[in-house]
Image: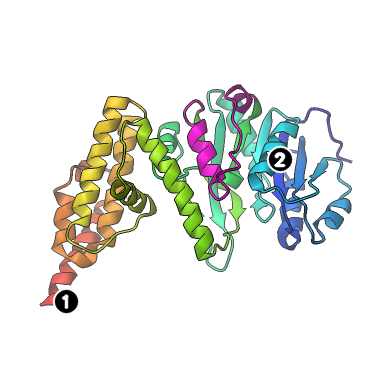
Amino acid sequence: MVSLKEHPQITVLMPVYNGSGYLQSAVESVLGQTLRDFELLVIDDGSTDDTPEYLRTIADPRLRVIRHDINRGLASCLNDGLAAARAPYIARMDSDDICLPERLAVQFDFLERNPAIDVCGSWVETLGKEPEVWEYPASPEDVHAGMLFQSTIAHPSVMLRKESFKAAGLSYNVEFAESEDFDLWTRASESLVFANVPRVLVRYRLASFSDVRREVKERYADRIRNRLLQRVGIEASPGELGLHGMVARGEVTLDRDFLSRADLWLRRLERANLAASVYDPDALKKLFAHRFWGLCWQSSSLGMLAWRAYRNSPWRDYPGIPWRALLGFYGRCMLQIGARS
């Protein structure tokens, strides 16, 4: 019989709202962990389905449930969970995802062996008919640099040191309802150290977003990116912020000027960071090289214009692009010449 210690090693924080469809598999994946010294803290955010009834059927003493009388939203749930957690380590978990059996053990061991790391995530595999592995950057420098564009840590894969968060006065901002994780991680990255374990530890269920929710989420993300640009000394115009968002999302416009504007924007960011010393210069150059490469690849229908944009950019000197990929890109661009002749 597993017993709940007064002070477990890990608190697994799982908010849920009307999540009965996938909740059982999520809970079972946590209770079946190879590391067994934890509490599963479920914050039921006023569910009106049979979520409360299911939770009452669980006899495992490691389960704790805090129930809200009304729905307060995810950020509020998570803040309540951070405050109520008993353990020195807090692991995030969504109510529709699945933990691999060794997830807690691997991340606990990683943080124990790396006391300078405050927050660690992992790679995730998407659930569905065509699963994909999302490989997040591993090193603290690469994780930090990547946040200039987007969250480089998967929210439901996170394990963090509670004391580090408490000392930094961090909590979720309830005003960022659709981007609370990106907002928190970018603020936390100003004082805490992040890393990712380079292996899949969580199976992640993709959420379906309406066009309205997606637009709201991106609007919040733009506010966060604007704040990050200000940290390196750039007061971006609306047009520049829009361009930055396109680079962040990997979007292109198939016109003659887009790649040139993106290239110049990345060069400006690099210069600003050298003056402000916010991000590791090598990590940022690697990030920009991969971003610009992706934009050029997507623009290969422009033919040799896209090829010349890449070859004339400073990002071509970064050695991280495999020669086979470069050869394939050149071939795609050349094909456009034949198609137009």
Residue type (three-letter) at the residue carrying disc 1 = Ala
Return the mark for residue 12. 2
Horizontally, residue 287 falls left or right of residue 120, namely left
> Are the residues tagged 1 and 2 within 8 Å (C-beta)?
no
CA neighbours of label 2 inside 10 A, class few (<14), some (14 to 19), many (20+): many
Which type of secondary structure does the marked residue at label 2 adopt?
strand
Q: Residues within 10 Å of mark 1 (few under 14, many from 20)?
A: few
Q: Nearer the viewer, residue 78 or 126?
A: 78
Quarter of the picture containing the N terminus is top right
Report the amino acid beneath label 2: Val
Residue 339: assigned label: 1
Along the viewing direction, whichever of 122 and 192 lies nearer the viewer: 192
Q: Position of residue 228 (x, y in %)?
A: 40, 36
- Which stretch did the figure color magenta? 163-192
The dot on residue 317 is none
Q: In this rendering, does residue 327 appear at all? A: yes
Which x, y percent locates residue 212?
A: 51, 62
Q: Is residue 334 left or right of residue 3?
A: left
> Measuring 59% from the left and 30% from the top, which residue is drawn there?
170
Q: How many marks?
A: 2
x and y, in percent, of residue 112 in the image: 61, 26
Query: Which image quarter: residue 121?
Result: top right
Pointer 1 or 2: first along the chain: 2
Is residue 197 visible to the viewer in this orientation of the structure?
A: no
Q: Residue at x 77, y 57 (%)?
A: 24
Q: Position of residue 116 (x, y in %)?
A: 53, 23
